[in-house]
Image: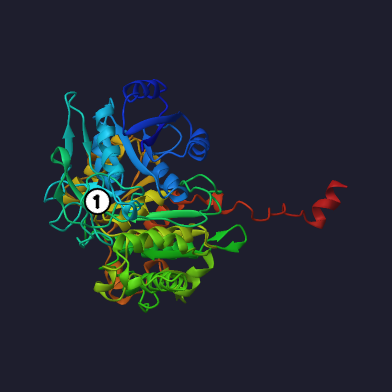
Amino acid sequence: MKKRLLIVDGDLAVGPSLYAQLSNSQWLEVCGQAATIEETWRLLGERKPDLVLLGSVQEVERGVLCQQLRLAHPHLSFIAASTPAELMWEPFWRNLGMWVVGKPVQAEQLEVLAMQLSSMPVQSLSSPLSAGRGQAGGAGMMGDSSGTGIIGAGGPGAGSFGTGMGGHGNGSMGIPMGATATGEALSAHGSSGGLSHAGPQGMQSSHTSAVAEAKPEPPYSAGLGFSPSKKRLMTVYGPKGGVGKTFLSRELAIYFAQRKDGVSPRKVLAVDFNLDLGTFATALNLPRSPNIYTWVQDIDRRLRDWLLSHGREPEQLSQEEWQSYIEAVQLSPEEVDRHVVIHEASGLHVLTSPRDIRNSFEIKDYHLYLILDALKRSRYDLILIDTAPDTTDATIQALFFAEQVIMVGNPVVDSIENIQRILKLLREADYPEERIQLCMNRLQRKEMFTLDEIRAYFQLHPSKKIFAIPDDQEVKKSINTGNPVMLHPGKLAAKDAIEALGKALIPVDEEAEGSPKRKGKERTSLWKWLKS
């Protein structure tokens, strides 16, 4: 049976060209082309495609669109069609579980994917396979006469058996499969692990997990679907360890928790997505339980109960079958309250990382996706996520769900270089640079590199500000004692700098929106008498 391909591309010439090339294919047929997001949703319901080819879409980033579509249609496989310049974005797309093909797209490339998709066992249709980068996590390319190629999906893993990752990137081993190419549903963030093995055309593949959720909410896109003044999702990211990322996350979360939205106190949640070595709880002297892992346990417990009630033995299910049943779990926004701890001095709520490192290995990509989706529907006005200094599933998910990203570094060569590499990747993927705020932490009075030199190296627009957090002895004391700088009663240079960054993220005029207008000062009775 032929697989059905939906093309999503603003270039209307792509559809007719591929339709003509695939007219005699026994594996694949084009079922339509959409040029807008609205048309995409309509055709998904009408044409029932098996694969979606994502080309140039002006309304939303390709990765975000993939997330939206997958949430509502978990059976779909996604392919990103990219220009040579856009292929620099390939590692992120692979982490989202997407296949990547070069433009112009060749029908033979798509037929290979459809052929392998058709040969997969029925029980594995919700468990995609991802092409790997050999043993070290490189891009698996399938060349053709035009010089373009297919780059496999899956995340850059730490294990030596392909690129996929179990959990959030610890190289866990999945269930080896005998086919190569994607299954019916790709992992929402490309993260489950598997054994690499040679497939047709010399490609390497590894097994990845699936994500599904019943009764999905309307699709989420940062900056769309809600009022920015009412709900915000921020992610603090540093592409190098030890730059003060958790310190800045703590201080910003405390700062925002002390502010108001109009007349009401702002409800703020901080989330520690550094799942194995997170220290956010330690930074505030908070207990590590409950935490994200207790929520994951609750999700799995409910899934097990559901399976038993339907006559299935959880222990007898394969990994891909277990994950395909995740659609039975529906998280409610109210569940968040059962798994957070509260910092009494500030009123900040915190969803901490697991107490035991080994617990982090059991947190899978579909757990993270369900949790993030519940968080964005929760009662919190602002959610701030502290990430790990890597590109694992948890970090990638946090970056793609974020409305604003605070990228942190130090004024030293290796930190500056890593930030430049990430910025280069984001620019070539047309990621909106206005979403990113850059911050240099622990700035000394006399540095080898000035902020102007760093700005030039980053190739920033002259109006783009780099926020500097000065080095301060009080900062070191606050880190060791767990007492936030923002709660320090005195005046500190670091405190003022963090407040300036916070005001740039949420301007004061937005905070004042909805607050009652002040009445003009009433004139004195003497003034009234003189005017009469």
Q: From the viewer's perspective, is 300 left or right of 357?
A: right
Q: Position of residue 268 (x, y in %)?
A: 48, 64
Q: Position of residue 18 (x, y in %)?
A: 34, 24
Q: Residues within 10 Å of mark 1 (few under 14, many from 20)?
A: many
Evaluate whether residue 359 shows in this view: yes
Q: From the viewer's perspective, is 227 left or right of 449?
A: right
Of 191 and 280, nearer the camera is: 191
Q: How many marks?
A: 1
Q: Which residue: 19% across, 23% down?
A: 146
Q: How is the image coloured?
A: rainbow
Query: In the image, is residue 461 above or below residue 76?
Result: above
The quadrant in which residue 475 appears is bottom left
Q: Which residue: 38% across, 74% down?
A: 294
Query: In the image, is residue 321 above or below residue 447?
Result: below
Tell me the amino acid under the disc marked 1. Gly
Of 333 and 389, nearer the camera is: 333
Of 497 and 40, nearer the camera is: 40
Q: Position of residue 345 (x, y in %)?
A: 46, 75
Q: Position of residue 121 (x, y in %)?
A: 30, 51
Check disc 1 and report the residue beneath it: 155
Quadrant in which the N terminus appears: top left
Evaluate whether residue 468 shows in this view: no
Secondary element under disc 1, as helix, strand or loop, is loop
The quadrant in which residue 410 appears is bottom left
The quadrant in which residue 177 appears is bottom left
